[in-house]
Every structure is written in C-alpha cells, then in structure tokens.
Image (cartoon, helix red, strand yellow):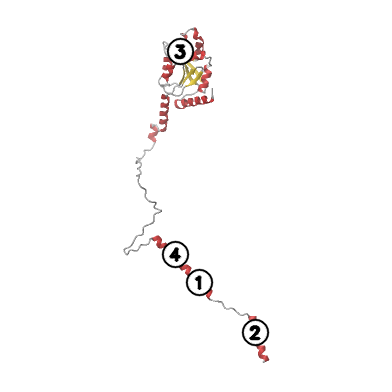
Amino acid sequence: MRQKRAKAYRKLMSLYSLSFGFRQPYQVLVDSHMCKEAVAHKIELVKQLGAVLQGTVKPMITQCCIHELYLQGKEQQPATDLAKTFERRKCNHREAIPGDECVSSVVGETNKHRYVVATHSHELRQKLRAVPGVPIVHLNRSVMILEPPSDATLRVKALEEEKALHPSAPEAAKLPARAPTEPPRKKKKGPKGPNPLSVKKKKTQTESGKPVKSADSQASGEKRKREEETDANHSAQRSEGTGHKRKRRRKHGAGSAGDAGREAGDQDD
C-alpha cells in the first residue's frame, strides 16, 4: 500500500475512533460476496483488512452468510472454508435469509456495536451509507479500498462537535446567570470632523473688543517677565563690578627707601 493512501486510511479510522468510539481490534463483518472475491483474486483477507484499517482486526460472519455459501455447492467450497475460519456472529434468525438483509439487520440503524462491514455487494453498500458511523470496505479488482465517510456520518460528526462546544444541562445549571447585554450600537457614517489637536483655540473677546488671554498665555507671559528681570539684574551687577576700580597699595619697602633718600638730600643742603 502506498504511503499516501495509508495516511488517508489512518485519518479516516481516527475520525471513526474519535466521533463514534471505534477501538481495536476492529470487528469486521464479512459477507459471502467478499469471501468469494477474496478466493477468486487469491487475497489474504485478514492481512489486507489489517493493512487497510491500520490496526488489528477481528473478522466475523453470520450464519445466514455461511448458509448462502452452502447453497452454491462445491464450486464455492474454498470460500466456505475461508468463512468457517471467522468468528460466528449471532444474527438470531431462525430461518436463513439473504446475506445482505442479515448484515443490514445486524448493523441496525445506529451501528451500536461498531462494526466495520467488508462487502462486495453494491446494494448493501448503498443501504449502509444511510447509517451514520459505518466504515465500508470493498474490493476494486484485487485492491481493497476503504470508502470515505458518507454524508450521514459527516452530519452526525458535525452535530457532535457543535454539541461539545456548549455546556450540558447539569453544567449550565451550575453556571451563574448572565446579565442581559445590550446590543452593540452601530456607528453613524458621515463626514469626519477636523483633528482637535491641529485646530487653533478660539480667542474670546470682552465687551471692549480686546481678546481675553487664556490662563496658559498669562502664565507664559509672567514667566517671560521674570526671566527678563533676572537678566537685567545680572547685567546691572556686571556693569557695577567693571566701573569700580580697586586702589593699588604701596609696598612698605619702597616707601621707606624713598623717605631715606629724601632725608639724605636735606642733610647735604
């Protein structure tokens, strides 16, 4: 089997396992048509079923299907011998009925026992597609194929997923009651106004006609006045410091030498 097909079959069986509770070993109902086709194409039926279903299998057959093979005589003796190796599934039919009807009655309307049906009958396959959660295996010449899920199966799967999203009745009773929520209001579509950050503030005018300054403009004006006053004080202090010159002190040694010179001059006179 190709890897791509094996991956698709594994995905299908995981769908049946998660949504309908299928478990290994899978119970496979085999009818008389499948037994005859397996013998005719020399197929190892149990091995091929395990490869297609991607797991261990448990083949089963009803007494009505075996009786149907008995009626076909010695020509179908190899198929009868193959059917005898499978486990018998009780169908509770006192008198034998056709194999398709027997398998359909065993599966029922809901496939409660989770059977996989291996059949080569076209009529039986059409009938079982109406039952949700029934994997169907058939032969295409010598290749065994697992059919994709039917519409009924996909419908039930979608309902189960939707049901899992909502709380059950006991869980809903434990939840606190929600307050009614108002529907969201629709925004009115229309021309948008200008950006308030880019619009200049309007100047209010007094009775005399002069514009009234806002609090921000007054505060900025006072700040400027303070800065101008401080600058004026600093400049005045600098001018005072530069206009007053410091007096030079005479050195004591130089003064005494000058006095001594003067006294010597007076004595000579």
- Say the numbered circle drawn on residue 44: none
- Identify the mark nearer the N-term, 1 or 2: 1
**Residue depicted at 65% across the width and 88% down the height:** 263
- Asked whether 49 or 189 is in front, the reply is 189
How many neighbours does mark 1 have within 10 angstroms: few (below 14), some (14-19), or many (20 or more)?
few
Residue on which disc 2 sits: 258
Image coords of residue 82 (percent x, y): 51, 13
Q: Which amino acid type corresponds to the residue marked 2 in the rendered image?
A: Gly
Q: How many marks?
A: 4
Looking at the rendered structure, the secondary structure element under dot 2 is: helix
Say which of marks 2 and 3 sits in front.
Answer: 2
- Say the numbered circle drawn on residue 224: 4
Looking at the rendered structure, the secondary structure element under dot 3 is: helix
Among all residues in the image, which is located at the extreme front? 191
In this orientation, does residue 88 appear?
no
Q: In the displayed structure, would residue 44 be above or below residue 238?
A: above
